[in-house]
Image (cartoon, rainbow, N blue to C red):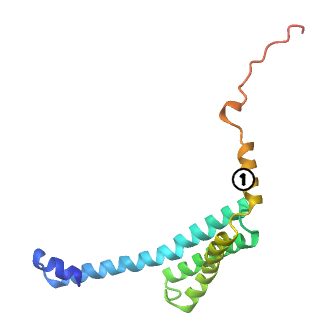
Amino acid sequence: MTLRQDFAGAAGGDSSSFVTAGRSLVAVHDWTFLLGPGFIVGVGNGLILGWLMYRSGLVPRGMALLGLVAGPVLLAGGTAALLGVIEPDSTLKNLAAAPEFVWELSLGIYLMVKGFKSSGIERLQADRRAVPTPHAVPTPCRVVADPGG
C-alpha cells in the first residue's frame, strides 16, 4: 500500500507493476525472517557463544552444553522450515526454538545474579600470561664447526 501511494503518481505506471514489487518485498521479508532467527541465532548464540562459554569455564558446564545442544536443534528447525518440511509458525518449529530460549534466558539470569565464575577468569588470565611475547621467540643460531674435531 505504501509503495502504491508513494510512487503511483510519480512513476505514472500501472498498478500491476506495484503489486509485483510489493510481492517481491514480502518474499524478501519472509526469507530473511526464516534465515535470521533460524540460522544466525543458532550459529551465533548457540554454537559459538556456547562453545566459548564451555571452553572458558566462565559459566557452569551444563549451562554451556545446553547452548551447544540448542544451536543445532534450532538450525534443524530453521532448515526444516526453510525447505518447507514444516510450517514456519508451527508448533514443531516453536519446540525447536525452546532450548535456545532456555539457554539464552538462563545465561542472562545467571550472569546478572552470579556473574562469571572466578575460576574461569583466573584460568583465562593464566593462559594469557603463558602465551610468549614476540620478543621471546628464540632466534635461529648458527652452527659452528667443532674446533677440536
Give SS at disc 1.
Answer: helix
Location of residue 24 by image quarter: bottom left
Image coordinates for residue 89, horizontal then vertical, percent: 49, 89
Residue 129 in which image quadrant: top right
Q: Amino acid at mark 1?
A: Leu
The quadrant in which residue 15 appears is bottom left
At 59% from the left and 69% from the top, the residue drawn is: 45
Q: Where in the figure is residue 35, as x and y percent of width and height?
A: 47, 74
Query: Relative to residue 96, is residue 53 drawn left or right?
Result: right
Which residue is denoted by mark 1 in the rendering? Answer: 124
Which residue lies at the image location 85% right of the left edge and 12% below the top edge? Answer: 146
Q: In this view of the protein, which residue sits in the foreground, 8 or 135?
A: 135
Q: Nearer the viewer, residue 79 or 95?
A: 95
111 and 45: which is toward the camera = 111
Q: Residue furthest top?
A: 147
Image spot of residue 149 (x, y percent): 90, 9
> Counting other residues with Cα less than 10 Å from the Cα at mark 1, is it few (<14), some (14-19), or many (20 or more)?
some
Which residue is rendered at x = 23% and y = 85% of the image? 1
